Every structure is written in structure tokens, then in C-alpha cells.
């Protein structure tokens, strides 16, 4: 296949990201939207620490504990296998973070 003809002579074999990709105006929030999102986040944090965010707080805290336990165990196991900590920590965090949606799938919010 002729990559230059396919992507254009100036781009080489791989396409470049479009110029407005990262700073697209359509991806930016207005000041009002940003304030609303920040207020929602603050409200959720307050409700969480008061124990009123979830309908069943004990179940939520149990699932958080399970996630932390799995992540910490995985970190220790990977480190014991001889991997350096700088490699074991991101791998354990990625797996533990990926486990959260599975653990929280049946939680109900108030």
C-alpha cells in the first residue's frame, strides 16, 4: 500500500492528531457548567462522608474495602515476584481501578 498517497504526502505513514483535538472548544465547559459540576462533586463528597450517599452504606464500604484489599494484595504479590515498585504500583492500581465498576454495579444511591 502506498502510505503517502493514502495519508497524504506531508503526513508520513501515520496520521497526525488534528490540531484542535486536545483544545477543542466543544470539549471545554463554560464557567457556569464548571461551577455546577464542582458543586455536584462537593455535595457528593459531603454526602459520602456523612454516610448518606449510598442507600446501603455498609455494603458500599465493604466493596471499597474489598477493592483496597485486592489492590494492596496484588501490589505485594507483584513486588514479591521481583518487579520494581514503580512497575508494580501502576499495574495494581490499574487492576484495582478496573475492579471498582464490577464491585459497585449493584450499589444503590439515595
Image: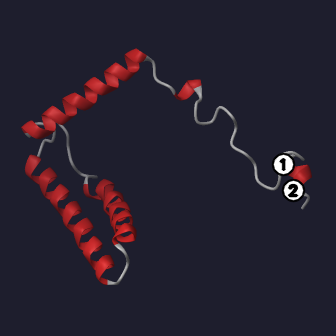
- Tag 1 residue: 7
Residue 46 image offset from top left, x and y in percent: 14, 32
Q: Which colour scheme appears in the figure? A: secondary structure
Where, quadrant-wise, is the C terminus in this rendering? top left
Q: Circle 1: is it few (<14), some (14-19), or many (20+) Cα within 10 Å?
A: some
| Extreme residue in the top direction | 32
Q: Quadrant of residue 40?
A: top left
Tag 2 and tag 1, C-beta contact below 8 Å: yes
Query: Is residue 107 depicted above or below 81 in this figure?
Result: above
| Extreme residue in the bottom direction | 81
Residue positioned 65% across, 31% down in the render:
20
Q: Secondary structure at mark 2?
A: helix
Q: Which mark is residue 40?
A: none
Of residue 98 and residue 85, the one placed in the foreground of this image is 85
Of residue 36 and residue 31, the one placed in the foreground of this image is 31
Where, quadrant-wise, is the N terminus in this rendering? bottom right
Q: Which mark is residue 3?
A: 2
Q: Quadrant of residue 30?
A: top left
Q: Circle 2: is it few (<14), some (14-19), or many (20+) Cα within 10 Å?
A: few
Residue positioned 21% across, 61% down in the render:
68
Residue positioned 29% across, 82% down in the render:
80
In screen coordinates, is 21 left or right of 47?
Answer: right
Q: Disc 2 versus disc 1: distance between alpha carbons?
A: 6 Å
Residue positioned 57% across, 24% down in the render:
25
Q: Secondary structure at mark 1?
A: helix
Residue 6 image offset from top left, x and y in percent: 87, 51
Residue 11 image offset from top left, x and y in percent: 82, 47
Amino acid at each position: 500500500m502506498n502510505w503517502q498517497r493514502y495519508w497524504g504526502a506531508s503526513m508520513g505513514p501515520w496520521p497526525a492528531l488534528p490540531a484542535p483535538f486536545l483544545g477543542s472548544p466543544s470539549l471545554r465547559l463554560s464557567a457556569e457548567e464548571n461551577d455546577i459540576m464542582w458543586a455536584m462533586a462537593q455535595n457528593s463528597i459531603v454526602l459520602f462522608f456523612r454516610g448518606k450517599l449510598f442507600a446501603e452504606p455498609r455494603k458500599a464500604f465493604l466493596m471499597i474495602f474489598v477493592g483496597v484489599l485486592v489492590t494492596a494484595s496484588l501490589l505485594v504479590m507483584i513486588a514479591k515476584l521481583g518487579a520494581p515498585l514503580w512497575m508494580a504500583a501502576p499495574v495494581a492500581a490499574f487492576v484495582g481501578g478496573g475492579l471498582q465498576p464490577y464491585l459497585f454495579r449493584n450499589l444503590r444511591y439515595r
